[in-house]
Image: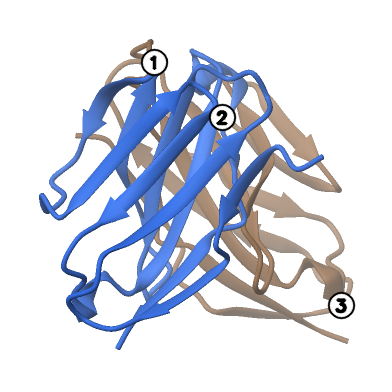
Amino acid sequence: GDSVTQMEGPVTLSEEAFLTINCTYTATGYPSLFWYVQYPGEGLQLLLKATKADDKGSNKGFEATYRKETTSFHLEKGSVQVSDSAVYFCALSGRRGFGNEKLTFGTGTRLTIIP
Amino acid sequence: DTAVSQTPKYLVTQMGNDKSIKCEQNLGHDTMYWYKQDSKKFLKIMFSYNNKELIINETVPNRFSPKSPDKAHLNLHINSLELGDSAVYFCASSQVGGALYGYTFGSGTRLTVV
């Protein structure tokens, strides 16, 4: 079945550091890939997505590129801020239509940014 | 306007009780979901409904019963609550083709069984 393997946390960085959170996946067919973010005490927010190979999703300075050859979707940001502290989830969704699609999540990576 | 709203936000109850969590979306989406987040933050799907019809039913105890009165609402009823049911429950919705358009989540309901 589908699965997502995500970099173990927690990750602690200084403000303005470069961020990479690794994510690899196993799926049949051509899934869509997502990064969701959960700020403390809040729900899940879609950060970015990519729906086909070589697509780059980007939002709020974060980027991730759908790499089919390496089955990866690593999250990057060039200069992190304290406000980026949150839990980040990589997820995939196969295309099966009519409600039969679902998100399969990685285990989440807790990111803490120190001023 | 909140896109996907869940009530209540917090729920503390005793073992053996029956409780319900309500979810409503105003996005016009056809598909709604329930996800469970455990104490280690791991998220797993429980159910999906498409236009009031149950589509996905993962291996969830029979004590959990979803109900969708219309495509904008998906409620979760839990009978005979157990300590292990303590978790955060998220409702979500998507257009048909969530894989292409993405999924919108509610803010979650933290259930604590004591």
The reply to whether label 2 and label 1 mark residues of one chain is yes
Look at the image and tell me whether residue B113 can be seen: yes
Label 3 SS: loop
Callout 2–callout 3 Cβ contact below 8 Å: no
Q: Colour of chain A?
A: brown
Write down the residue under mark 1.
Answer: A95
Chain of the residue on which disc 3 is drawn: A
Residue sitting nearer the eye, A56 or A87: A87
Q: Are marks 2 and 3 on the same chain?
A: yes
Instruction: Locate residue A13: give its quadrant.
Output: bottom right
**Co-location on one chain, circles 1 and 3:** yes
Q: Position of residue A114 (x, y in %)?
A: 80, 86
* Residue type, mark 3 in image: Glu
- The CA distance from mark 2 to mark 3 is 27 Å
Choose top left, top right, bottom left or bottom right for residue B15: bottom left
In the rendered image, residue B38, in percent from the top left (x then y), is placed at: 35, 69
Going 30% across and 29% down the picture, which residue do you hit? A27
Residue A66 got which mark? 2
The amino acid at mark 2 is Tyr
Report the side of B60 relative to B96 (left or right). Answer: left
Chain under label 1?
Answer: A
**Residue at screen point 62% across, 58% down:** A43
Q: Which residue is mark 3?
A: A15
Crowd tier of the residue under label 2, counting other residues whose Cα lies within 10 Å: few below 14, some 14–19, many 20 or above: many
Q: Nearer the viewer, residue A85 or A65?
A: A85
**Label 1–label 3 contact, CB within 8 A:** no
